[in-house]
Structure formats: C-alpha cells, structure tokens
C-alpha cells in the first residue's frame, strides 16, 4: 500500500488559525522539524499529522485542538478548489467540480456527494486516521467554507466522525452549528440539499474552464510524483533481495513493463536512473551513518561484485567508498 500524503495547502489555514488563536505557529513547526516562517511547498506524509497535532495541542494548551482551531480558521483561503466553486453556475455544480480534484488536498479524502430527497450527504472518506484532530478541524473548515460560498445559506444538519471518543457534545454543537455523531462508519457532512441550487454571483464559464484545466494539470503532477515515489520504494525493497528490474517493479504495480516504462517517460524519468540514484543515496548513507563493512554495503545496494560497486561509486562521487567515508567522518 502506497504512503498517503497531504498537500501543504491543506495545512496553511491551520497555521493562520494558530496565529489567530494567539499561538505562535513557528513553535509548532519547529517541534515537528520544519523551519519557522511557514510551510514549504509540496506534499508531506499523512502520518506526520499525528506529530503536528500533538505539538499544536501542547502549544495551544487545548485538549480538543482540532475543534479549537476550527473556530479560528479563515473562511476563504484562495485554494484552487474554491475558485472552481465560485466560477461554477451553482453551489452544487461547484461542489461536484471540486470533488473531482479533492486528491489535490489529501490522499485520505475519497469524497463524493449523494442526494436523497431533501438531504445531501458529503462523504469525506473512510480512512480512520491515527488522531481525531485533523478530521475534526477539516469538518469545521468545510462548514465555514460552504457557509461563505453560499452567503450564509449553508446549514449543516450533522457531522459524522469515525472516532468513538471525542469532545463533549456541546463543544461540537458550538463549533459546527450542528450535532456530531461519533463512532460512525465514515467521515461525512449532512446538510439541506436545497442549497445545492444556490446560484453563484461569480459564475464565469471561461474562468471555470481555465480553473479545471489548471486542476487537471496539478492532479497529473500529483500522480506523476506518486508513481515515481512508488517505484523508488519498490526499488529499495527489491534491492534487498539482490536486484530490482523494471519487470519486477512493474509486476508489483500490476502493470506491463512496457506500460511502466511509458508512464515513467511521461513523468520525465528513466527507470535505470531511479535505480542508480537510489543505490548512490543508500551507499552514501551507509558509508557515513554506519560502520557496515564495504562487503555488506555492496550487497545491500544490489551489486554482485565489490569491484563493480567501487567503479560505480567512483563514477558517481569522484571518490572511492573508503575515501568518501574517511572524508565524511573527518578521519585523516
């Protein structure tokens, strides 16, 4: 199973909420190993959410930190998905457009909309994460965003959360403006379906096409990076057993080798270059951070002979493995 990731755009409003609550966001960032001053661009492992929210809870002194910060979130963040809402003809059209590209925010969001009679259900996924603060914050963010996009007409009926234990019922009511159901089989938001017909004052077909084109390009980039990351991970796993070929990696990804080669070419990389890069980085790490014998490093990097490893490492770095280790550790 591939590692799940989130886009930093999802967390930037949380940084704003920390600041609005009177908490210094730099203290939280430093505690999770990030530089102060804001989040870097790109995506990060979803597992890092646990560490982030623990640090945020400590700095805020707030047990229910996801709910707490949801109350300080800005209503509009300028995200691409929000522009899809605004340029669509109605709120419902905008929501359906945005749901096609929800993975731009997080791999954990498998969102879809169901409408039955006068009720609408926005499901936000069935991935039960390791902490409750992220989904509790996200539910609050969605409600605030929808309220702003519909000029106050959006009214939630219930928030469904998968974790069984959480804040007191009145706390959810205060933040969400509706009850929260704990221990549900999904994360979901239930609301009045009539609001889906709310016209957008900013509807613009030309802008909608432009925003969708940009969203498609961004999603293609996420998928490109995802494929390269998966291939790198499989190369690392297969090298332990003596080698990693294109055919072996393709089989693990359940696709023909030719198709994998084509997809990597479309992503702008070659399989052999990924293998070489992985071997080089692993060799450097083992030489500098461990005292493993060269023979062991040769085996772990997938080479059959020490002489082949020595020639390759000299070509990569300009030094022999022994020279590189000595210089790196400041010996002699």
Image: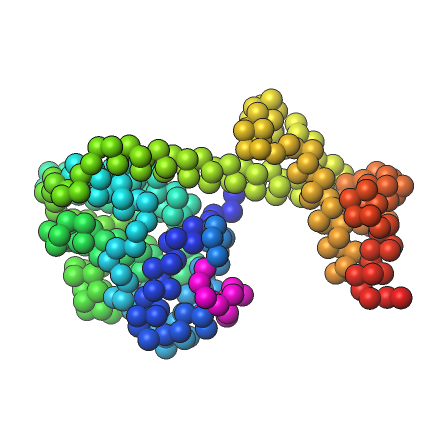
Which residue is more in the foreground, 200 or 93? Answer: 200
Q: Position of residue 216 (x, y in %)?
A: 38, 34
Q: In which quadrant will I find the C terminus?
A: bottom right
Q: Which quarter of the picture shows residue 107?
A: top left
Which residue is more in the foreground, 142 or 206? Answer: 206
The magenta segment: 28-39
Residue drawn at point x = 82 percent, y = 55 percent: 324
237 up-or-down from 20: above or below = above
49 up-or-down from 283: above or below = below
- Residue 299 appears in view: no
Horizontally, is 49 left or right of 320 in the view?
left
Q: Position of residue 320 (x, y in %)?
A: 86, 50
- Residue 284 appears in view: yes
Residue drawn at point x = 72 percent, y = 39 percent: 276
Which residue is more in the foreground, 145 or 111? Answer: 145
Residue drawn at point x = 37 percent, y = 54 percent: 10
Q: Position of residue 233 (x, y in %)?
A: 61, 43
Taken as a whole, is the magenta stretch helix, strand or loop?
loop
Horizontally, is 51 left or right of 260 in the view?
left
Q: Which quarter of the picture shows residue 65?
A: bottom left
Q: Find out whether residue 58 is within the magenta segment.
A: no
Q: Find out whether residue 30 is within the magenta segment.
A: yes
Looking at the image, how many numbered discs can be counted on the residues? 0
The single residue placed furthest to the bottom in the displayed view is: 61
Residue drawn at point x = 31 percent, y = 34 percent: 210
The chosen color scheme is: rainbow
Which residue is more in the foreground, 43 or 138? Answer: 43
Q: Which quarter of the picture shows residue 301?
A: top right
Q: Position of residue 130 (x, y in %)?
A: 43, 58
């Amino acid at each position: 199973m591939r590692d799940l990731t989130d886009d930093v755009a999802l967390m930037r409003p949380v940084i704003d909420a920390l600041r609005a609550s009177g908490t210094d966001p730099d203290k939280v960032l430093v505690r999770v190993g990030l530089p102060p001053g804001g989040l870097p661009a790109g995506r990060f492992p979803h597992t890092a959410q646990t560490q982030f929210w623990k640090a945020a809870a400590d700095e805020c002194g707030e047990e229910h930190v996801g709910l707490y910060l949801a109350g300080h979130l800005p209503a509009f963040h300028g995200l691409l998905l929000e522009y899809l809402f605004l340029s669509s003809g109605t709120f419902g059209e905008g929501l359906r457009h945005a749901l096609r590209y929800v993975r731009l925010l997080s791999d954990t969001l498998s969102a879809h909309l169901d409408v039955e009679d006068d009720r609408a259900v926005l499901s936000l996924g069935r991935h039960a994460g390791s902490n409750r603060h992220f989904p509790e914050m996200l539910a609050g963010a969605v409600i605030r965003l929808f309220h702003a996009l519909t000029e106050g007409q959006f009214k939630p009926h219930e928030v469904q959360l998968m974790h069984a234990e959480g804040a007191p019922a009145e706390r959810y009511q205060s933040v969400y403006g509706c009850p929260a159901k704990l221990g549900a089989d999904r994360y979901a938001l239930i609301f009045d379906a009539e609001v889906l017909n709310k016209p957008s004052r900013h509807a613009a077909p030309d802008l909608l096409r432009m925003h969708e084109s940009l969203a498609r390009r961004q999603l293609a980039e996420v998928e490109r990076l995802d494929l390269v990351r998966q291939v790198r991970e499989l190369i690392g796993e297969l090298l332990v057993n003596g080698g990693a070929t294109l055919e072996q990696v393709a089989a693990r990804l359940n696709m023909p080798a030719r198709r994998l080669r084509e997809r990597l070419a479309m992503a702008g990389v070659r399989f052999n270059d990924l293998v070489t890069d992985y071997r080089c980085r692993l060799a450097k790490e083992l030489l500098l951070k461990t005292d493993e014998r060269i023979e062991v490093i040769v085996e772990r990097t997938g080479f059959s002979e020490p002489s082949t490893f020595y020639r390759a490492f000299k070509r990569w770095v300009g030094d022999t493995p022994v020279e590189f280790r000595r210089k790196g550790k400041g010996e002699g």
